[in-house]
């Protein structure tokens, strides 16, 4: 089959780069900046995929294929230039093409822009899935928001997290293509009035609303080694009227741009703080903005091939990536019932057969709820539709389970109380044909503990699809040296099908392979040492164990437990300077939500510890602590290949899955983790003897809760734990501020230790002693690390997507043919 990369040479790549320098940037090479060169080279790479992009969209339309429409608030796609070079297959000629431009490939890649479209695992998972969908030649569209400032850029000021705007779009973004012809109006506020509708009689009609606009920007998602180039469509908000010249000329300069500023705020930042009423309102509008634009774009595309909606659910799946896009359900009902005049029952049948919902959390605080009053104010027609959906749903429940008031209350979309709320997870379940969790344990707990009422009402609706990662970014791109070692031993077929990497297992005991594996790890650690020095000023040794915890900062993820372990080791050495331990460098990277104050205290604690421990001669050469600022995909690509230990220590039963654990294991880090999320399945695949599991399991914690958990009982039994807590309480790392971390101490003691730090502490210490013992025997360590790499094939996002296709989406590949095939 003809491939769009056929015939691409270094000369052609250079010609396209120079073309864009002259005709896109209006410069010659003498005037070009390094950023100009990066933009023009990126445009040239994008040009190479344009034929595939056009052919993909054309074939999907002409063949009227069934498509998956993936709705997500986040897409943590990282830098795209190197990724797209690999996908197109031109990484081998790029350096040659750049010689004339007087810049190296390494310099160019450093300038590439990291898109500010996500924050954590939710967005990275979405990015991995888009990669797999394109590579597996599956008809797919991603929908998201084009955030002007992303989440935030993290800096540290005296150890405290400070948030700065992420101006990632300031100098231009070469991968996006604006589509103003598909701009859509978005309506909010207003009222619902009875009006006469021709042919329908008197109907509820949404009127007097405020209108702003959504402008789409398309990003090509290039499949690896195939012609498929799918699309991620991102929406930017703008005022419908724009600049008010009449008001400006009257001298009211603020009011002249008031509407413009208000509209643009909708896509200004990811997750605006919801600690104020205005913040809650903006976040609700933001979620509706994504839902409304995406649904109506899907409907627009469908109507190009169809005169009625009888096949809408056959041709479209809409996957809700968590509850943020859930307003898409009442929005589709509004479009079908109000605009397309489809009777309610038929519209509801179409809607429920179209949507599927992925749940990503069991945390009660993370299961979104919106006040009825707020939805009524912002989206009055949708509030009516949700009430009607709930009324009809509860009528059916009453018929199927008469007299079961508790079931009615728990299943209701509307939560009664002093302030009525809409439960978005309940709405997602009621309005979807399938609901999945993201690891075996999570899916089981979702079905039996979090939402047993729906499992009772909808037997068979719940299923599991364990998360996965794209090895193309997280091994082939992030660790080419390890990739080469694997290919030398087992060939290259595994690059296309990660399940074939299992053949590398046969080399786990090979001394030469072990030696090269550990050399690669040391090389990666040495490079990371330079990055650590540049970012923090701390000097660390690549000969130490690199103990890594990199993930969103949350109390249930228990970065504080790692900090407690460090304090324990520090105390031991201070008490007896001759204490023998394996030298360790503890590497943290994480962002805390701006309003999550206790999480920000954890960051401050770790940075305060680092300043003292890293300069204490008693522990020199044995303990180092670093917290790397502004964690993102690019930094993860540097940390993960260098990690020896992967910290996955969440409270059992609270981590839905995790994907960082998979990336780290794939690169040969050994997991220290609880029996939680995907850790369980990793243990099952790599072997429990090749992973360090500690702590209470979900059933143990349930029993502790039932009996009445008393964290202070653990303090009474452990002198070491007591000293750790006293160090936090009294802030031994900065005696000038003795009360600085009292909130952390109180959270662990007087406030009940909600996340069971103290219950797991002793076992965590013992587990880390096993880590030390194993690391002292390099051959055994290398063997286990290689076995981790070789047994991670099942955790490919390709496998996850195939599971979705088989059990939820019922989607078939559509290989793209170019002209001439």
Image: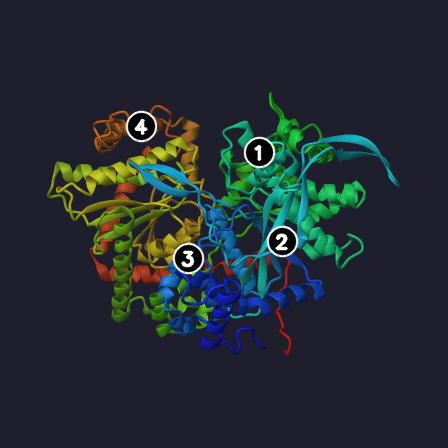
> What is the secondary structure assignment of the residue under circle 4?
helix
Residue assigned mark 4:
745
**Vertical position of residue 231 compared to residue 102: above or below:** above
Do the CB atoms of the residues marked 2 and 3 lie less than 8 Å apart? no
**Dot 2: few (<14), some (14–19), or many (≥20) neighbours within 10 Å?**
many
Marks 1/2: CA–CA distance? 42 Å
Q: Nearer the viewer, mark 2 or mark 3?
A: 2
Label 2 secondary element: strand
Residue assigned mark 1: 253
| Label annotation for residue 69 | 2
Q: Which quadrant of the view contains residue 140?
A: bottom right
Quadrant where the N terminus sits is: bottom right
- CA separation, marks 3 and 1? 64 Å
Residue 683 in the image: x percent, y percent? 39, 53
Task: Kindly state the secondary structure of the residue where label 3 is placed.
Answer: helix
Picture coordinates of residue 219 (x, y %)? 55, 57
- What is the crowding at mark 3: few (fewer than 14 residues within 10 Å), some, or many (at least 20)? some
In which quadrant of the rendered image does the C terminus lie? bottom right
The residue at which mark 3 appears reads as 685
Depicted 231 relative to depicted 385: above or below: below
Give the Cα separation between the discs numbered 1 and 4. Answer: 51 Å
């Amino acid at each position: 089959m003809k491939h769009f990369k056929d015939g691409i040479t270094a000369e052609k790549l250079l010609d396209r780069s120079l073309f864009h320098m002259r005709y896109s940037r209006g410069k010659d090479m003498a005037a070009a900046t390094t950023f100009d060169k990066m933009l023009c080279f990126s445009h040239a790479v994008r040009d190479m995929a344009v034929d595939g992009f056009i052919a993909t969209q054309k074939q999907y339309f002409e063949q009227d294929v069934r498509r998956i429409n993936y709705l997500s608030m986040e897409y943590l796609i990282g830098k795209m230039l190197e990724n797209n070079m690999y996908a197109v297959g031109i990484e081998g000629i790029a350096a040659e093409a750049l010689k004339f431009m007087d810049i190296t490939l390494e310099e160019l890649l450093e300038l590439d822009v990291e898109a500010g479209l996500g924050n954590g695992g939710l967005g990275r998972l979405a990015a991995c899935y888009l990669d797999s969908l394109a590579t597996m030649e599956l008809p797919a569209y991603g929908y998201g928001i084009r955030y002007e400032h992303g989440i935030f850029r993290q800096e540290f000021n005296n150890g405290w997290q400070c948030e700065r705007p992420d101006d990632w779009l300031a100098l231009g973004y070469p991968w996006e293509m604006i589509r103003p012809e598909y701009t859509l109006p978005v309506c909010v506020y207003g009222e619902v009035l009875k009006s006469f509708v021709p042919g329908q009689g008197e109907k509820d009609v949404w009127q007097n609303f405020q209108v702003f606009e959504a402008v789409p920007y398309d990003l090509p998602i290039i499949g690896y080694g195939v012609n498929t180039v799918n699309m991620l469509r991102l929406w930017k908000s703008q005022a419908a009227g724009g600049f008010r010249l009449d008001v400006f000329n009257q001298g009211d300069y603020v009011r002249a741009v008031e509407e413009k500023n208000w509209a643009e705020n909708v896509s200004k930042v990811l997750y605006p703080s919801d600690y104020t009423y205005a913040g809650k309102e903006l976040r609700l509008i933001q979620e509706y903005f994504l839902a409304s634009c995406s649904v109506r774009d899907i409907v627009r595309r469908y109507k190009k091939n169809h005169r009625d909606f009888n096949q809408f659910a056959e041709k479209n799946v809409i996957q809700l990536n968590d509850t943020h896009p859930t307003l898409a359900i009442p929005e589709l009902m509004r479009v079908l019932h109000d605009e397309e005049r489809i009777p309610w029952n038929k519209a509801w049948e179409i809607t429920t057969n179209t949507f599927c919902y992925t749940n990503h959390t069991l945390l009660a605080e993370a299961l979104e709820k919106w006040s009825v009053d707020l939805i009524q104010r912002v989206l009055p027609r949708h509030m009516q539709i949700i009430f009607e959906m709930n009324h009809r749903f509860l009528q059916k429940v009453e018929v199927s389970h008469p007299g079961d008031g508790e079931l009615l209350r728990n299943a209701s979309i509307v939560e009664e109380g002093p302030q009525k709320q809409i439960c978005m997870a309940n709405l997602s379940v009621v309005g979807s044909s399938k609901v999945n969790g993201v690891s075996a344990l999570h899916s089981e707990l979702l079905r039996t503990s979090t939402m047993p009422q729906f499992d009772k009402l909808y037997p068979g609706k719940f299923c599991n699809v364990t998360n996965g990662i794209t090895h193309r970014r997280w091994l082939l791109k992030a660790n080419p040296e390890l990739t080469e070692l694997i290919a030398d031993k087992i060939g290259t077929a595994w690059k296309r099908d990660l399940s074939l990497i299992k053949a590398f297992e046969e080399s786990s005991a090979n001394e030469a392979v072990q030696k090269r594996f550990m050399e690669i790890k040391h090389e990666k650690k040495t490079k990371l040492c330079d990055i650590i020095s540049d970012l923090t000023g701390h000097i660390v040794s690549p000969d130490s164990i690199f103990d890594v915890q990199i993930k969103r900062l949350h109390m249930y993820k228990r970065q504080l437990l790692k900090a407690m372990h460090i304090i324990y080791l520090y105390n031991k050495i201070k008490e007896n300077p001759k204490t023998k331990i394996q030298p360790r460098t503890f590497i943290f990277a994480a962002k805390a939500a701006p309003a999550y104050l206790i999480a920000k205290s954890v960051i401050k604690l770790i940075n305060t510890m680092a300043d003292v421990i890293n300069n204490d001669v008693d522990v020199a050469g044995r303990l180092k602590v670093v917290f790397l600022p502004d964690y993102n995909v690019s930094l993860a690509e540097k940390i993960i290949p260098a990690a020896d230990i992967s910290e996955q220590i969440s409270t059992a039963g609270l981590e839905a899955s995790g994907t960082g654990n998979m990336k780290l294991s794939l690169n040969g880090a050994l997991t220290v983790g609880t029996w939680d999320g995907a850790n369980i399945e990793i243990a099952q695949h790599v072997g429990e003897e090749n992973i360090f599991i500690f702590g209470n399991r979900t059933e143990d914690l349930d029993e502790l809760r039932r009996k009445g958990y008393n964290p202070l009982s653990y303090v009474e039994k452990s002198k070491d734990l007591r000293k750790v807590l006293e160090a936090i309480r009294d802030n031994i790392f900065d005696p000038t501020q003795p009360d600085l971390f009292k909130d952390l101490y109180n959270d662990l003691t007087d406030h009940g230790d909600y996340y069971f730090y103290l219950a797991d502490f002793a076992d965590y210490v013992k587990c880390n002693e096993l880590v030390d013992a194993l690391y002292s025997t390099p051959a055994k360590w290398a063997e286990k690390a290689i076995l981790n790499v070789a047994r991670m094939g099942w955790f490919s996002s390709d496998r996850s997507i195939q599971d979705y296709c088989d059990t939820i989406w019922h989607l078939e590949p559509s290989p793209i043919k170019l002209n001439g095939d």
